[in-house]
Amino acid sequence: MPRVDLVFSAELFEWRGPAPFYWLTVPEDDCASIRAEAAAASYGWGAVPVRARIGATEWETSLLPRNGGYVLPVKNAVRRAEGVVEGDTVMVGMSVAPRDGRQANGTGPTC
């Protein structure tokens, strides 16, 4: 099992911003530790690559800045696999995952 640095609960909400449309807000108490690692991990636009887990489903994505904090996008495949719908409060395990040569989608070298 990969390293998990943060565990939090948040309510799934729909936001008609960038796709996907479903998100979890990272609690403010956890944002300070993310900011501390963001300088080494971020690849632009304030996006911070992470590895996240809800239930038995893990995925790689990027936190996006919103209202001074961060939001975690939840892919449709994750929502379906875990039976999560808008308004549900879910438990998330997450760690900042520096790209270390991975492309933004988590595969292969960047050059």
Image: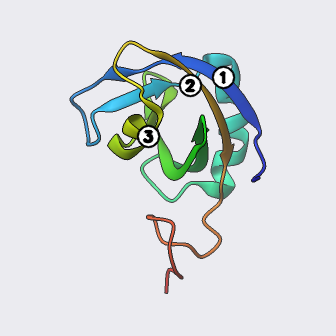
Residue for point 69% across, 18% down: 29
Residue for point 42% across, 49% down: 45
Of mark 1 and mark 3, the one earlier in the sequence is 1
| Residue 19 in the figure: left or right of residue 47 | left
Q: Which amino acid lies under the numbered mark 2 shown in the image of this protein?
A: Val
Residue at mark 3: 81
| Residue 111: image location, x then y, percent | 49, 87
Secondary structure type for disc 2: loop
* Residue 74, visible in the rendered structure: no
Residue at mark 1: 8
Question: In front of the other: label 1 or label 3?
Answer: 3
Q: Nearer the viewer, residue 36 or 92?
A: 92
Residue at mark 2: 26
Residue for point 69% across, 44% down: 95
Q: Which amino acid lies under the numbered mark 1 shown in the image of this protein?
A: Phe
- Find out whether the residues at labels 1 and 3 contact each other: C-beta distance under 8 Å: no
| Residue 18 in the figure: left or right of residue 2 | left
Question: In front of the other: label 2 or label 1?
Answer: 1
- Find out whether the residues at labels 2 and 1 contact each other: C-beta distance under 8 Å: yes
Around disc 1, counting alpha carbons within 10 Å, would you say few (fewer than 14), some (14 to 19), or many (20 or more)? some
* Residue 6, visible in the rendered structure: yes
Around disc 3, counting alpha carbons within 10 Å, would you say few (fewer than 14), some (14 to 19), or many (20 or more)? few
Spatial separation of the CA atoms under disc 3 and disc 2: 21 Å
Secondary structure type for disc 1: strand
Q: Which mark is residue 51?
A: none
The total of numbered circles placed on residues is 3
Snapshot colouring: rainbow
| Residue 69: image location, x then y, percent | 52, 25
Residue for point 55% across, 72% down: 102
Spatial separation of the CA atoms under disc 2 and disc 1: 8 Å
Q: Which amino acid lies under the numbered mark 3 shown in the image of this protein?
A: Ala
| Residue 63: image location, x then y, percent | 50, 41
